[in-house]
Image (spheres, coloured by chain):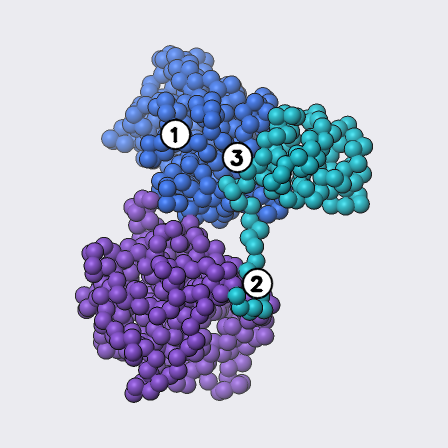
Amino acid sequence: MKSIAVIGGGVAGMEAAAKLSKMGFSVTLIEKTNQLGGKLNKWHALFPSRRPADEVLNGLKTRVQLGINILLNTEVEHIENDDDGFAIALNQNRMITAHAILLATGFDIFDAGKKEEYGHGIYDNVITSVELEKAFRSGAVKTLQGKTPKKIAFIHCVGSRDEKAGNPHCSKVCCVTGVKQAIELKEMIPDSEIYMFYLDLRMFGRHFEELYKEAQVKHHIQFIRGRLSEAFENQDHTVMIKIEDTLIARPLKMNVDLLVLLVGMQPSGSINKIIHDLELEKEKDGFLKQADKHLAPHKTNIPGVFVIGAASGPKTIEETVNEAGAVTFEIADYLQNKIATKILKNENSFI
Amino acid sequence: MIEFGYSIQSNRQIDFDRNTRQVYKYIRRKEPSIDWCMSCGTCASGCTAGYASDFSLRRMILLARRGEEKEIRDGIFRCRLCGKCLNACPRGVNTRNIIYWMQQAVKNTQTL
Amino acid sequence: MKIEGKKRLWREYQKEIAEDHYYFARSCVRQQIFPGAEQICVKILQHDLGRDVFDDPGHTTCTGIGYHTDVVQLETIMTVVARQFSLMTNAGYENFAVSCITSFGIYTEILETWHHFPETEEKTREYLRKATGREFKIPVNLAHTSDIFYKFRHEIAQKSRYKLINHNTGEPLRVVEHIGCHYAKMFPHKGVGGAEYPYVLAGLAEALGGEIVDYPERRHCCGFGFRQYVVKANRGYSISASKIKLESMKPYKPDLIVTNCPGCTVFLDRWQYAISEMEGKTYGDNGQGIPVLTFEELTAVCLGYSPWEIGLQMHNVGPEPLLRKMGVPFDPSRKYLGAGGKNIGIPEKPKVLVVE
């Protein structure tokens, strides 16, 4: 039986492992943390429907149960690529082999502290969108002083479209995440005022634009076009923000009880070793290079190594699940061709 | 007071918390579609008044949202109420009504 | 505010500061407006800290003000800077200690330019050779004098007779630290603590017992801006910038402002007087202002130097409330007596700002 190593146990890895296993391959799912689900574990609700994240997570978990070798707390230490396939050394002196590798290694969340002037980790009431989801999960959003925030600002593109922060790309999902979170906050705290500071609103997906209009019309959430230049803490622990209102072309100052930074996705730092061992190529933005953006988006420059999900650029869950289905075909096709080539090779050797 | 030959400039920063935004709150009650505006500028690009002056409904709505009401008072009566913007708005904002209420707000509010 | 977060950043922004043997480059603004500050800077380094400082009468202005107001060309200022380095080289020094933030910015920026565009350094060497026949070495270490005081802050604190502590209540004094823009905003890694949360003066003031006030407009420029001040008609741009800062810090009731830049010292001090005359507003207690001291003046007061010897009478805002809080004895009748007891003239009292 042909074996496949899926590296990364988030949405991409779980869905692909389930599909590949269903196709009859022997699948090993390698996850570095102690649980499957990746960053979905930290999420409260998903855009655009605001469906609970746990619902999707449980759906994925149900599918993954079909005879998959799941290795938790497992890190890839070294990979060797030879004619027969891949030899993968894992921590605790374990070793597995695979005929193909699927990289489902996902992304890192931008460290908001790198935007020093925003004061994350310094000012009491500056949090990230990830921390806000955590607060949603806990059922209450409070300031550090334990008060219910009545005035909240969201800052788009924190660590995205920011060359100085090392991320020139658009993280794609933050715009709609911000709109979703703003609506959730407004429903949780109906007498709050919410302001979104954006550069562009990239409502690319189905129902996203409708969510944006709902935020404006139904929830009276205000959208102000401009990028935060700096934040400060006031004596009463509120946060003063300075932004140019670019559509009016004047600087604007506002005090808020809570400042939410919509942090972007960046290339995963933990796969550099794998990239080195397999001689994979990255693009300028640091994400893995796809063999052909249009015709072979799930292949890498190395035959037998495939990639899906945010490892090859920011993606939504919907896109990732789609890719998991598509890559299953690609891997099956590759392994079949490889057998055919090998038979041909062996036959030739008799001559 | 000493005349030093220069003066202290007033701050042109929009101080969002100091502004009351009463004109905006008033219009929103009268014409809720003001909230549908996404600042695309379609209204201003074909505006008859905008050819001859710096009048822009897009800007007027934004100024109302920020509470910068002095500028509204200076500008809002430049509109000729021709209705072209109403026709043009992709989101169906009742622009003519907004202008009418904005003018009423400016006329009726003592503090402005 | 989470101090741990600041400390994390401070660890990332540390710079090399030489131990000893400094070639001292003076500031043209400071020599004229607060001459005592530089005098006492050299004295503290030499006598209190026992360091070797060469105070060279041969060096000139860096021409930074001329450069920033567009009357001095880039090639010219580079050649002037090269000449200062040549004086340092000839005097046998390698560590360049700069008294002025404008100059510090100029030296840093020119060294950086030479590093990235070596042809500009070659051209400058050629110009200097043609004009003066001189050669020069690039300094091994470039530091602002506030960097050096920061480096020795614990030693200074150990030797200090007075602390930044209210001697009646035992409470730490509330200190606003204001860093000159050209100290770290252009090259954050050239400043202790970086550009957003500089630690150079905060560290010194903390070592001396003070408590740092972090107020909303802390990062705002004092408004000097060179041509904004030099051209009289433009001074409104300058004073309005200082006013934004003063208004923002007032609710925190700071006991003093400490600065490391000539421009900031002048304007945060002098504009308090001008604002009081123009708008009737004052920012300290009882119609007085918030005293503005350079880091050397503050250090000198703590070390026990007489306030009048170090030139605190040259400030528009009187230092007396601060001195009383610190428990520093002073003789009001000697305020306007200069060296050798000579009367230096008593300035007219402002109409609004209360000066003792």
Q: In this view, does A192 lie above or below C4?
A: above
Left or right of residue A181: residue A140: left
Circles 2 and 3 on the same chain: no
Q: Residues within 10 Å of mark 1 (few under 14, many from 20)?
A: some
State the residue at coordinates (39%, 66%). C354
Query: Observer-nearest residue: A130 or A334?
Result: A130
Question: Residue B85 appears in which quarter of the rendering?
Answer: top right
Asked if residue C64 shows in the view, the reply is yes
Residue C280 circle label:
none
Task: Please name the color used to draw chain A.
Answer: blue
Residue B7 circle label:
2
Q: How crowded is mark 3: few (under 14 residues within 10 Å), some or many (20 or more)?
A: many
State the residue at coordinates (71%, 39%). B76
Residue at label 1?
Answer: A148
Q: Which chain is cyan?
A: B
Q: What residue type is labelled 3?
A: Met
Disc 2, SS: loop
Disc 1, SS: loop
Disc 3, SS: strand
Q: What residue type is labelled 1?
A: Thr
